[in-house]
Amino acid sequence: MMLASLSPTVADREPVVSLIGVGKTFSNGTMALENLNLDVFPGEFLSLLGPSGCGKSTALRLMAGLGRATCGEVSIVRHDPGEHRGDIGFVFQEPTLMPWATVADNVWLPLRLKGVSRAKADPVIRDSLALVGLAAFAGAYPRELSGGMKMRVSIARALATKPSILLMDEPFAALDEITRFKLNDDLLRLKAELGCTVVFVTHSVYESVYMSSRIVVMAARPGRVVSTIEVDVPMPRGESFRATARYAELCREASAALHGAMAPDDHL
Amino acid sequence: MSASTDDTPATSGPSRMDATRLAAILLPVAILLLAVAGWEAAVQLNEIPPYILPAPSQIAATLVKDWPVLFGSLLVTLRITFLALFAAVVGGVLLAILFAQSRWIELSFFPFAVILQVTPIVAIAPLLLIYLEPGTAVLVCAFLVAFFPILSNTALGLASADHNLRDLFDLYGASRFKQLIYLRLPAALPYFLGGLRIGGGLALIGAIVAEIAAGTAGQGSGLAFRIIESGYRLNIPRMFAALFLISVAGILIFLLFTALSHLLLHRWHESARKREA
C-alpha cells in the first residue's frame, strides 16, 4: 500500500485537512476505508478518483465532519477555531435544495442557521448568485430550474459562508456533458476568484485531469489510496487543454492507475 | 444562461384547457339535474306520499320553511366538527413532533394511537356518553376519528425530510429546533395537509355518528339529532333536508382544505404541478 506522496511544491506547507490512518466500518460490517492517509494542502484542487465503493465519498464526508472515523484521526485546520464548521462548504451529488424555498432563500440557509437575518444576508446572497450566473433567478423555485441551474444554486449556497475549503461529492455526475463542461470551467474560474481549496470526488478520469492540481486514485474493498498524480499544468487551462498531448498523457496515466486499482468485478 | 421553459404553462391550447375545465363542472351538474328531475317526475307521476318518498321540490320547500331550526343545527354540527378538528391538529402535530424526537417514544406510544384508530367509533360512543356530558362526548368522538390520520401523516412527513439536507443542517451546526422549524416541518407540510383533508371529513362523520349514538339523550341540536327527531315524527322531508345539509357541509369542508392545500403548495410541490401532455 502506498501513502499519498507529497509533491515538492506542497511538501513545505501545512495541510488544511489531514487524514491519518483513517478507517471506517459501517454498522452493517462493510469496511469502507482502511488505513487512509491523505493530506489536503491550501489552495490546491484535489480530486479523489476511484471506482464505486472505494470510499471516496465516505472520505469526503469524514472531512466534513459528517460521521465519525472508526479509527485514525481526521484533523481540519480552521481559520476561525471558534466557528463551528463554518469554514467548509459541501456540495452533494444531487442539488439538495429545499423545494419549498426560493433560490435566494436556499442560498440564505447556511447564513440563516448562523442567525444572520435575511436583510443582512441579502448582499451575500446576491453576490453568491452572481458568481454562478443566476442573479436573475433569485425569486424562482427550484422546480422551475434545469438540472444544471439547480447545481449552480447548490454551489452558490456552499459559497455563501465564504468557505476556505469546498468539498464536492460528484457534483456534476448527473448532468449532460455540455452542461458538465460548462460547470467545470465555471468552477475553475470560481476557485481562482475565491482562492479556496477544493476537494472534488469524481469517477471521471477526464474530469479529474482537466480540473485538478493533484489526483488521488483510490481502490475499493477496502477503500484506500493507491497512487497520486500531480497535474503540473498551470491554471487557467481553458478548453484547449483538452486537446494537448500532456492532457492525453495524464489521462492515460490516471486511467492506468484507476484500472490497476480495480478488481475485475468493480464498476466505475 | 436562459430559464428552462419546460415548466411554463402551455400557451398553445388554452381554449382546450378551458373546455375541459368547463366540462368537469357542467357534466356532473347536468347528471345531477337529470337525476333530480327524474326523482321529481317519478314522485309526481306515481303520486308517492311524502312520508314514503318526498319530492325534491318538497325537500327544498322544507329546507326553506325549517331553515331557522336546520341552520341552527348545521352551525352546531360545524362547530363540533371544527373544534374536534382543531384539537386533532394540535394533538396530532404535537405528538408527531414528539415521535420525531425519539424512536423510543414512537415505539412506546404509536400502538395506542393505532388501537384508538381501529376501534369503531360507534362502539366507543355509548361508553363516552356514560362518562361524559353528551356535548363533550360527541366532541371527543369526532376528535378521536380525526386525530389518527393527522398524526400518522405528519409523523411520516417529519421522517421523510431529505437525508442530504439533514446532513447539510448538521454540517452547519443547526440545532434540533432549527432543523425542525426550517427542514422537518416544511417537508412534512404536504403530508400534514393530506392528513388534514382526510381528518376534516372524518371529524364530520365522527360528530354525526356520536350524536346518533347519543340519540335523544343529547340535548342535541346538531343535524344528526334533527334526523333522529324527524324520524320519530315521520317528518321524512325534514330528514332529507338535514341529510342534504350534512352532504353540503362535507363538500364544503373538502373544498376548504383542498383550497388551503393548493394555496400552500402550488408554488413548489409536485402534487400541485400541472403536467404537460
Image (spheres, grey):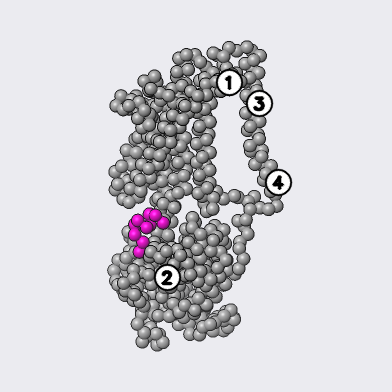
> In front: mark 1 or mark 4?
1
The dominant secondary structure in magenta is helix
Q: Position of residue A113 (x, y in %)?
A: 39, 63
- Secondary structure of the residue carrying numbered label 4: helix
Q: Chain of mark 4?
A: B
Which amino acid type is shown beneath numbered disc 1?
A: Ala
Q: Position of residue B102 (x, y in %)?
A: 31, 50
Which residue does the numbered mark 3 point to in the structure image?
B34
- Determine which of the numbered discs, if any, sits on residue A161 in the image: 2
Q: Nearer the viewer, residue A96 or A239?
A: A96
Which residue shows up at 31% across the image and 27% down it? B132
Which residue shows up at 53% across the image and 34% down it? B251
Which residue does the numbered mark 1 point to in the structure image?
B61
Which amino acid type is shown beneath numbered disc 3?
A: Leu
On whether residue A200 falls in the magenta region, the answer is no
- Secondary structure of the residue carrying numbered label 1: helix
Which amino acid type is shown beneath numbered disc 2?
A: Thr
Report the side of B13 relative to A39 (left or right).
right
Quick check: can you spot residue A149? yes
Which residue does the numbered mark 4 point to in the structure image?
B15
Q: Position of residue B244 (x, y in %)?
A: 53, 26
Q: Which residues are magenta?
A: B173-182
Residue at mark 1 to residue at mark 4: CA–CA distance: 40 Å
Report the side of B227 relative to A223 (left or right).
right
